[in-house]
């Protein structure tokens, strides 16, 4: 009888021999997963999220799991963070970017199911509509990030994109509180997590573009960009990664050259 170690090696070799081409490629190349809202998601009707353009600038496959209208809270409650957790494998990269739909208060009887509890730590609220416990933005984002890191993935917590900074003809780059919350979340998670200030990168790009050009990227409202605008927002993200804007991220080694220079 062959020893157990020999049988185990033979079994592993056999299982590898039957791996599909997709599985083999997956082991050789990390996948990037995107978790976010409409500013990242595939949309339509003259609008588009920046996640759809990221594959143009990196060498890795991208799976865009961003969904319009979601916040860190609703993305959690709908099981969407958990879905990504079921998919990620060692060395995959997950980019998490929320903030546009996270504001407001869950305490109202008209709670929209998206507002997070104010604060950045263990504060809790109760939905005025359903009575459910509502946690902070940081609670939701950090819990998701830690679940991915536990599976060997790397996480980039990205601050939300800005609204039209030239709306009304005057440049305004004041960030929402969720920009700082995202930075805090990455710091709290620690090893395995990094931060990209996408808000600041896009803001610098808008300043360079100026009033008329920036306004032209927002055909319907002050939050959602045209496809051209989404492409530029993706380029700003990639340039920030290339410059170690807020520290080195795991995406840097996978950037295509030449790297965009938009700010």
Image (cartoon, rainbow, N blue to C red):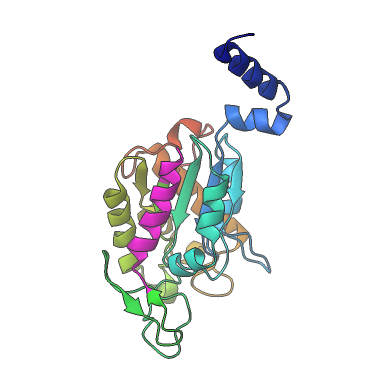
Which residue extends farthest front? 1
| Residue 207 visible in the displayed image | no
Residue 154 on the magenta span: yes
- Count of numbered badges drawn on the protein: 0
Give whichever of 1, 64 is nearer the camera. Answer: 1
- Please report the residue visible at 35 percent of the width from the left and 44 percent of the height from the top: 194
Give whichever of 55, 137 is nearer the camera. Answer: 137
Horizontally, residue 23 falls left or right of residue 197, namely right
- Please report the residue visible at 42 percent of the width from the left and 64 percent of the height from the top: 162
User: Over which residues does the magenta segment extend?
Assistant: 134-155
Residue 64 x, y percent position in the rendering = 59, 52
Residue 169 x, y percent position in the rendering = 41, 73
- Please report the residue visible at 71 percent of the width from the left and 20 percent of the height from the top: 17
| Residue 45 visible in the displayed image | yes
Horizontally, residue 128 falls left or right of residue 257, namely left
Residue 240 x, y percent position in the rendering = 40, 44
Residue 261 on the magenta span: no
| In the rendered image, the vertical position of residue 255 relative to residue 72, given as above or below | above
- Please report the residue visible at 45 percent of the width from the left and 57 percent of the height from the top: 97
| In the rendered image, the vertical position of residue 21 relative to residue 152, given as above or below | above
Give whichever of 227, 67 is nearer the camera. Answer: 67
Name the quadrant containing residue 143. Answer: bottom left
Give whichever of 52, 168 is nearer the camera. Answer: 52
């Amino acid at each position: 009888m062959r020893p157990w170690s020999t049988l185990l090696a033979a079994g592993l070799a056999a299982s590898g021999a039957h791996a599909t081409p997709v599985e083999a490629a997956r082991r050789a190349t990390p996948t990037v997963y995107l978790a976010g809202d409409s500013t990242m998601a595939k949309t339509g009707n003259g609008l588009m999220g920046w996640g759809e353009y990221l594959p143009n600038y990196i060498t890795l496959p991208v799976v865009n799991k961003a969904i319009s209208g979601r916040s860190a809270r609703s993305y959690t409650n709908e099981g969407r963070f958990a879905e990504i957790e079921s998919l990620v494998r060692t060395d995959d990269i997950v980019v998490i970017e929320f903030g546009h739909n996270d504001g407001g208060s869950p305490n109202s009887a008209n709670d929209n199911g998206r507002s997070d509890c104010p604060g950045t730590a263990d504060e809790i609220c109760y939905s005025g509509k359903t009575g459910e416990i509502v946690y902070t933005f940081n609670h939701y984002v950090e819990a998701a990030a830690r679940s991915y890191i536990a599976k060997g993935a790397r996480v980039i917590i990205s601050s939300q994109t800005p609204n039209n900074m030239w709306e009304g003809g005057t440049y305004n780059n004041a960030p929402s509180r969720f920009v700082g919350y995202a930075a805090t979340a990455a710091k709290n998670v620690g090893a395995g997590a990094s931060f990209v200030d996408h808000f600041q990168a896009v803001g610098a790009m808008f300043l360079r573009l100026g009033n008329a050009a920036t306004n032209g990227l927002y055909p319907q409202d002050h939050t959602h960009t045209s496809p051209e605008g989404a492409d530029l927002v993706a380029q700003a993200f990639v340039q920030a990664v290339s410059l170690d804007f807020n520290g080195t991220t795991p995406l840097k080694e996978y950037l295509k050259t030449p790297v965009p220079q938009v700010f």
